[in-house]
Each structure stands twice: as C-alpha cells, then as structure tokens.
Image: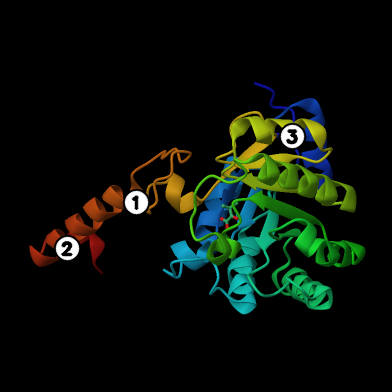
C-alpha cells in the first residue's frame, strides 16, 4: 500500500490530483459536526464532505431536499472548526444553484465566507454547467456529482442503480467530460455500474470518487452514520458497515439508566 500522501500537512485539490496520478486511493467520509469531524481529521482521512445527507441523518427528513443553505453553513462551520488536515467540501443544497448561475455564485460565496470550507459540491452535468462555470470563475473549487443524484429523486422516483441503459451511460460520460473540462477538481459517481465508473475514471483527468461505483475509481466515499452502523434502516449493497454503533450506544445508555435507577451511579469517587 502506497502511503506517500498520508503525511501532507493539508490536503488540497492539487494533492488529490497528484494522488490520482500516483495511484494512491482517496478516502472520503461525511461529517456534520465538530466532534465527529475532529475524530475523522485525526485519522488522516483525505476528504471530509459536509453532505446534504445531513438532511436525512441529522435532521430526520426522508430526502435531501429540505435542508437549507443556513443549515448547511451551520454544519459546515462546525466541521471546519475541528479540521486541520482534511479537505472540507460542502454540498450546495437543493434550490441554491439550479437554473440561476448568479444565485449559484452567491450561495457558494456564502458557504465559503461563512463556513471557511475549502470547496463546494453540486449535483448534475449539462443542466448546471453555467452555475459550475460561474462559481469556478470566482476561484471556488467545485466537485461534481453524477449518477444517482439524490436532489433529483422526484424526477426518478426511485434510488435504483443509475446509467444502466446505453443512453444514460452516454449522457453520464458526456457530463463527466463537461465537468472535467470546465475545471472541476473531482467528481463523485454514485450507484452506477462498476465498468462504467472505471471507464470514466480512465477517461477524465480529475479524481473520481465512487459510492456504489466499484473499486476501479480514484477513491471512495461513504456516509459516516451508515458505515458506523448508527443508521440501520439504510442498507444498500454497496454499504460496508464497520461497526454497530447503534447497538453499542443502546447498550451504554441502558447501563447508565440501570446505574442511575439502582443508585450505582454516582459512586463515592464520582462526587464532591
Ligand atoms: O450528501 C452526501 O452524503 C453525499 C455523498 C453520498 C456522496 O453526497
């Protein structure tokens, strides 16, 4: 395993590009608050994504659509306060960049100014390229997101694997080239056939980060609460659970309740 980039003091978009060229895989996870972001940054994770999945895992909504720009900025600033090394990317929430590139620019400026993050991410290809261009022209690094784009759930009606037909695959390849040529520093590919993701990763210059897109891409991303087993209701095939924190937390809280009720807590040493 190549570990040459593990010691860089700060991950930048240039570091990610070099990692792709050298074949070192990029590890990315989501975080939405100070405490988790601090733990993640201390592990040497390359990218922390303040995903709009906060809408689901933090706020309990059934989609990513309801989360607001103010809420994303709140989560992002909490994360930024904890992070020294990882690149911090913030999702632009639904309704803040589609169809109006001037609004896209002002939304992205608010994210960068008020949170102190390093970059923004937005969903879509050709449909949002004007917004991408305008944000990039302000010197703000942009990551694209293609394949399953959760902000468009009402257009598709389902979270099934995307780009399985020839026409959809061709559009995805075209969109990836558009984002690459526009100057995005990376692209997330979500829930698409592994062969297609591998082809995109070979064809475009910038790093491709997969989620449910197989291993022949330049890095992987998962939602933190899913991989830690805090959220149990979401179980797609691509998700590897590294822990069952839901049960661990339940166990600890149950012990605490029992200790309080039986006067086991606090003991002599835990009082003044
Ligand atoms: O919001 C999010 O967590 C994401 C990842 C799934 C890539 O966009």
Report the front residue among 49 and 37.
49
> In the rendering, which numbered label is found on residue 257?
2
Q: How many marks?
A: 3
Of the two numbered discs 1 and 2 on the same chain, state the one appearing first in sequence. 1
Q: Can you give x and y, in whole percent of width and height, for residue 13 in the image? A: 80, 47
Q: Can you give x and y, in whole percent of width and height, for residue 144 in the image? A: 73, 53
Q: Residues within 10 Å of mark 2 (few under 14, many from 20)?
A: few
Residue 111 visible in rendering: yes
Q: Is residue 209 above or below residue 77?
A: above
Label 2: which secondary element: helix
Label 1: which secondary element: loop
> In the rendering, which numbered label is found on residue 73?
none
Q: Can you give x and y, in whole percent of width and height, for residue 214 in the image? A: 58, 32
Residue 246 as seen in the image, left or right of residue 175: left
> In the rendering, which numbered label is found on residue 201?
3
Residue at 57 percent of width and 41 percent of height: 43
Residue designated by label 1:
232
Q: Gap between marks 3 and 2, in whole Å? A: 51 Å
Q: Residues within 10 Å of mark 1 (few under 14, many from 20)?
A: some
Whether label 1 lies within 8 Å of ligand 1 gets the answer: no
Q: Quadrant of residue 109?
A: bottom right
Of the two numbered discs 3 and 1 on the same chain, state the one appearing first in sequence. 3
Quadrant location of ligand 1?
bottom right
Q: Is residue 268 above or below residue 46?
A: below
User: In front of the other: label 3 or label 1?
Assistant: 3
Label 3: which secondary element: helix
């Amino acid at each position: 395993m190549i570990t040459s980039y593990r010691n860089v003091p700060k991950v930048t978009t240039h570091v990610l590009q070099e990692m792709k060229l050298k074949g070192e895989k990029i590890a990315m996870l989501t975080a939405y608050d100070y405490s988790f972001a601090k733990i993640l940054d201390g592990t040497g994770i390359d990218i922390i994504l303040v995903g709009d999945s906060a809408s689901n895992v933090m706020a309990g909504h059934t989609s990513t659509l309801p989360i607001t720009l103010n809420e994303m900025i709140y989560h992002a600033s909490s994360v930024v306060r904890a992070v020294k090394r990882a690149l911090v990317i913030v999702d632009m929430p639904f309704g803040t960049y589609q169809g109006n590139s001037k609004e896209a620019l002002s939304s992205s400026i608010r994210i960068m100014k008020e949170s102190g993050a390093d970059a923004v991410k937005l969903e879509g290809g050709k449909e949002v390229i004007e917004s991408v261009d305008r944000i990039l022209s302000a010197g703000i690094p942009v990551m694209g997101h293609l394949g399953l784009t959760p902000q468009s759930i009402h257009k598709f009606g389902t979270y099934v694997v995307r780009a399985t037909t020839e026409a959809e695959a061709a559009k995805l390849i075209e969109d990836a080239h558009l984002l690459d040529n526009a100057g995005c520093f990376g692209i997330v590919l979500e829930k698409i056939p592994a062969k297609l993701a591998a082809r995109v990763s070979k064809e475009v210059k910038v790093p491709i980060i997969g989620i449910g897109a197989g291993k022949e891409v330049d890095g992987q991303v998962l939602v933190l609460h899913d991989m830690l087993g805090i959220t149990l209701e979401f179980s797609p095939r691509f998700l590897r659970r590294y822990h069952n924190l839901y049960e661990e937390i339940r166990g600890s809280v149950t012990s605490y309740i029992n200790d309080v009720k039986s006067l086991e807590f606090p003991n002599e040493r835990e009082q003044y």
